[in-house]
Amino acid sequence: MPKRFQESLTTAQREELENCRDHHQKAYMREKAAAILKIADGHTGSEVARRLLLKRRDEDTVYSWWHNYHVEGLAGLSVKAGRGRKPAFSPSLPDGGAGA
């Protein structure tokens, strides 16, 4: 049987996550908040990842959202600067990067 988290959310944390789930401008933040609330309601992370979100996720991803929230709060759910694919071309020079 999958391990269930024994931690619960405080009233303030639950309100913060519900507000984020219902009103945040970023869809990924709404999804992460919803996943954490479902885990707090007694579902396993693997159950949430497999069938309780709009898109299937890896269960390790959902567990990392839970961990990041408990370590950093709501800020732990946001995408950090510098993440993602780096551009192949960056027009930082006035001539577009072409040498003389």
Image (cartoon, rainbow, N blue to C red):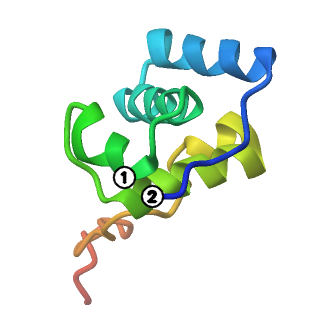
**Which label is found at residue 46?**
1
Tell me which amino acid carries mark 1.
Ser
x%, y% of residue 70? 73, 46
Question: What SS does tag 2 mark?
Answer: loop
Residue in the foreground of this view, choosing between 61 and 77: 61
Q: Which circle's residue, 2 or 1, is located before the other in the chain?
A: 2
The residue under the point 80% across, 23% down is 10
The quarter of the displayed image where residue 25 is located: top left
Q: Amino acid at mark 2?
A: Pro
Q: Looking at the image, is 12 positioned above or below residue 84?
A: above
Q: Is residue 76 left or right of residue 78?
A: right
Q: Nearer the viewer, mark 2 or mark 1?
A: 2
Q: Nearer the viewer, residue 66 or 4?
A: 4
Spatial CA distance of label 2 from label 1 is: 8 Å
> What residue is rendered at 24% in x and 47% in y?
50
Which labelled disc corresponds to residue 2? 2
Look at the picture and state if 91 lies above or below 17: below
Label total for image: 2
Q: Quadrant of the C terminus?
A: bottom left
Report the front residue among 98 and 17: 17
How busy is the neighbourhood of tag 1: few (under 14 within 10 Å), some, or many (20 plus)? many
Quadrant of the drawing holding the N terminus: bottom left
Q: State whether residue 15 is above or below residue 27.
A: above
Q: On the picture, is 84 further left or further right than 53?
A: right
Outermost residue toward the bottom in this view: 100
Can you tell which quarter of the image residue 95 is in?
A: bottom left
Q: Secondary structure at mark 1?
A: helix
* Callout 2–callout 1 Cβ contact below 8 Å: yes
Label 2: few (<14), some (14–19) or many (≥20) C-alpha neighbours in 10 Å:
few
Residue at 45% x, 26% y: name it: 34
Q: On the image, which quarter does residue 14 sit in?
A: top right
